[in-house]
Image: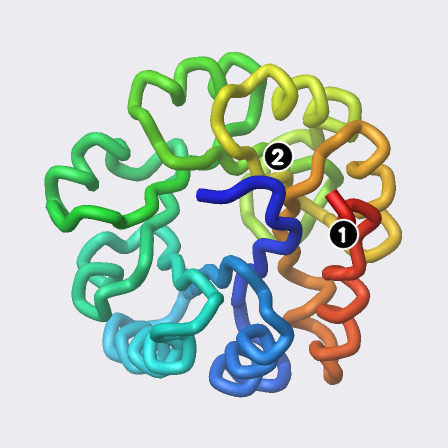
Amino acid sequence: MKTPFGLYLILTNPVVGYEACARIAVQCGVPYLQLRMKEEPPEKRLQIARVVREITYETGTCFIVNDDLDLARAVDADGLHLGQEDDSVLNARQGWGEKGKIFGLSTHSFQQAKEALKQSPDYLGVGPVFSTSTKKNAGVALGVKEVGRIVQSSPLPCVAIGGINVERREALFDVNVLNFAVISAVNQSSDPEVVIQELIKTKYENL
């Protein structure tokens, strides 16, 4: 998993629709696209996941499924992202068994990020950076400085998450946090292409 890569986009109820938003993400060259569908029935999740897999297949956009190993395996996604309350990364790797798949793990504190290394994920999600209403029980916002401390201390690639938009992204760059996940700023926009283009304009383009 290359680093820095910048934008990690999470699709959750985009106002323009999953298919349209996924196509825009691929066209804009978004490196990582995660599908997170919590409330929909399994049939709907499978239908959307198949569409997103088709759109991202053999492109520069890596397709990650949130939480659902069976769904990730069913559509041959590029990887799986797990939370602290989900099954372990170790068990998920054994359950999938296919080489080359990417496994991410959410962490919400310095200690969790440290403990996560025992599971050998490919990357860590770190947050919430800012208060967010996107995820229920997201926990207390860690703040930019603490997220920066966690990211800089980790040997793994890290993705900051939680309440990040175009303006707040700059504060992350100031503490050398270069990989960031975005949800609401894109999903709630009627013109996600404009927002995505702004988000991928990073001040480390020449690194």
Q: Residues within 10 Å of mark 1 (few under 14, many from 20)?
A: few
The reply to whether callout 2 and callout 1 are in contact (CB within 8 Å) is no
Residue at x-position 38% and y-position 36%: 122
Q: Give amino acid for label 2.
A: Gly
In the rendered image, which residue does mark 1 sit on? 205
Residue 43 to residue 139: above or below: below
Residue at x-position 88% and y-position 52%: 167
- Horizontally, residue 29 falls left or right of residue 68, namely right
- Horizontally, residue 196 falls left or right of residue 70, namely right
Instruction: Identify the image quadrant of the C terminus.
Output: top right
- Horizontally, residue 34 falls left or right of residue 200, namely left
**Residue 161 shows in the view:** no
> In the rendering, at what x and y percent does residue 179 appear?
64, 43
Instruction: Identify the image quadrant of the N terminus.
Output: top left
> In the rendering, at what x and y percent does residue 130 appear?
75, 39
- Among the two numbered marks 2 and 1 on one chain, the one whose residue lies closer to the N terminus: 2
How far apart are labels 2 and 1 at the CA level?
24 Å
Residue 156 to residue 169: above or below: above
Residue 131 to residue 36: above or below: above
Residue at x-position 48% and y-position 27%: 156
Badge 1 marks a residue whose secondary structure is loop
**Residue 109 shows in the view:** yes
Q: Give amino acid for label 1.
A: Glu
> In the rendering, at what x and y percent does residue 112 appear?
47, 19
> In the rendering, at what x and y percent does residue 55 appear?
41, 81
Residue 127: numbered disc: 2
Foreground tag (2 vs 1): 1
Q: Nearer the viewer, residue 94 or 176?
A: 176
